[in-house]
Amino acid sequence: MAESPAPDHPTSEYPAVPDRPDAVEPAPEQIRPSGFARLLIFVGFVFALIVASCLGLRAMDVLPTFDNPFAEETTDRSQPVLLQSMRDLQRYVAADGTFQVIVDLQENRDNIPDFLINRRTLFVGSGTVETYVDFSGLSGDGLKIDEEKKTIELTLPAPQQSTAALDMERSYVVAEERGLFNRIGDAFRDDPGKQQQVYQLAQQRITEAARASELDERARENTQRMLESLFARLGYTTVTVSFASP
């Protein structure tokens, strides 16, 4: 008869557990967010709620507006205007004309390719020329008055024209071509005399065009009508206006 093991001898294997039909497998452990994750979700929700509230109040003009802290700002540090001279004008501006000229100015050097040294500027200049009569040049015998007949004779100096004044709001550079050496030179120094040369040429062309126009004749007619209306209101029946030779 085989001997049974001692009751205090440990067994090397666990006894098999019989399957139970009504046994329920344990459900997998549900993953729950940690405390830090819940805190982040709560903070995000509160922040979104605050932003939405601010936008709603701003739409109803409850909150004041806030300027952009990075907006561009222009500071004017110009000095006060200094009056240099003052004079009394004794002339009557009888007519003016507005002219436009296209200046095509090119500077280059002989025997040097244009891609190395060349400067060409296409400029559209708009300017105004005034035609006036200077009453300070009225001589002593230039005014003859007959109070009995209510007549008056005026001999005025010839109309004069002013230098063309460029309108910089309507004047602009259309195109500008520069050679390689010109671009390098402009990168190290700025020559405002080049622009001034273009402006002066535009003024000269406009002034010449005004002299060839009918501004002088229109100035004579306007001056005559102005004086006839003025002296007619003073009671003179005949007003004769003539102009001296230019």
Image (spheres, grey):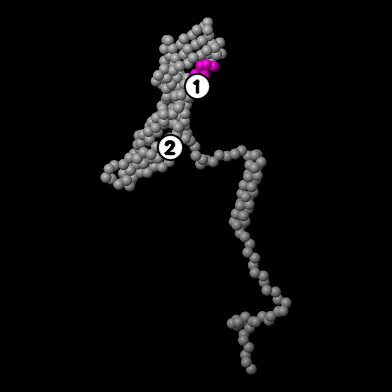
**Residue, x 42% and y 24% (percent of image)?**
161
Q: Position of residue 15 (x, y in %)?
A: 64, 82
Q: Considering depth in this image, is 37 or 161 the residue closer to the camera?
A: 161
Q: Residue furthest left?
A: 111
Q: Is residue 235 above or below residue 69?
A: above
Choose mark 2 or mark 1, whichever is in front. Answer: 1
Indicate left or right for 237 with 196 as reference: right
Judging by the rendered image, the residue that carries numbered circle 1 is 222
Looking at the rendering, the stretch of residues picked out in magenta corresponds to 222-229
> Is residue 164 visible to the viewer in this orientation of the structure?
no
Which quarter of the rendered picture does the N terminus lie within? bottom right
Judging by the rendered image, the residue that carries numbered circle 2 is 124
Q: Element type at marker 1? A: helix
Q: Element type at marker 2? A: strand
In terms of secondary structure, what is the magenta stretch mainly?
helix
Q: Residues within 10 Å of mark 1 (few under 14, many from 20)?
A: some
Q: Is residue 210 above or below residue 121?
A: above
Q: Amino acid at mark 2?
A: Val
Measured in 3D between alpha carbons, the distance from the residue under mark 2 to the one under mark 1, in whole angstroms, is 31 Å
Which mark, by number, is residue 169?
A: none
The quadrant where residue 34 appears: bottom right
